[in-house]
Amino acid sequence: AYYAVPGNTDAVQAFRTQLTRLWFQALRRRSQRHRLDWERMNRIATRWLPPARPVHPFPRERFNVRIQGRSPVR
């Protein structure tokens, strides 16, 4: 779950991609035979770094409230 600014999921996805790439390099550096390929790394990343999905509605939906009658604020 991602609790942050609506519309920022592209930046979070770019961060996840960069993090996966750096993690791949670090894991490959530790291996002596380079047994880790991108197919396996993507499975690992999907399990441990799930994609960001907003858990709250966008501001237009969230603040689109109609007050019936008079305003409670005076």
Image (cartoon, grey):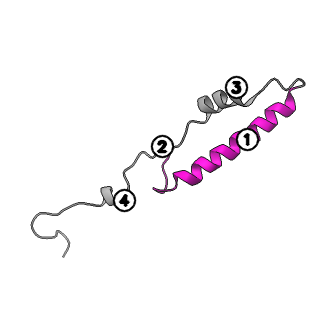
Q: Are marks 1 and 4 in contact (CB under 8 Å)?
A: no
Identified at 76% across, 35% down, the residue is 24
Q: CA distance from mark 3 to mark 4?
A: 38 Å
Which of the two discs, 3 and 2, labels the residue nearer the N terminus? 3
| Element marked by disc 3 | helix
| Element marked by disc 1 | helix
**Residue 5 as seen in the image, left or right of residue 38:** left
Q: What is the three-letter code of the residue carrying label 3?
A: Arg
* Nearest-to-viewer mark from 1 and 4: 1
| Element marked by disc 4 | helix
> Where does label 4 land, which residue?
59
> Where does label 2 land, which residue?
53
Q: What is the three-letter code of the residue carrying label 1?
A: Arg
Circle on res. 21: 1
**Percent x, y for residue 21?**
73, 41
* Nearest-to-viewer mark from 1 and 2: 1
Q: Residue furthest right?
A: 32
- Quick check: is 12 in the magenta stretch? yes
Q: Are marks 2 and 4 in contact (CB under 8 Å)?
A: no
Magenta highlight range: 2-31
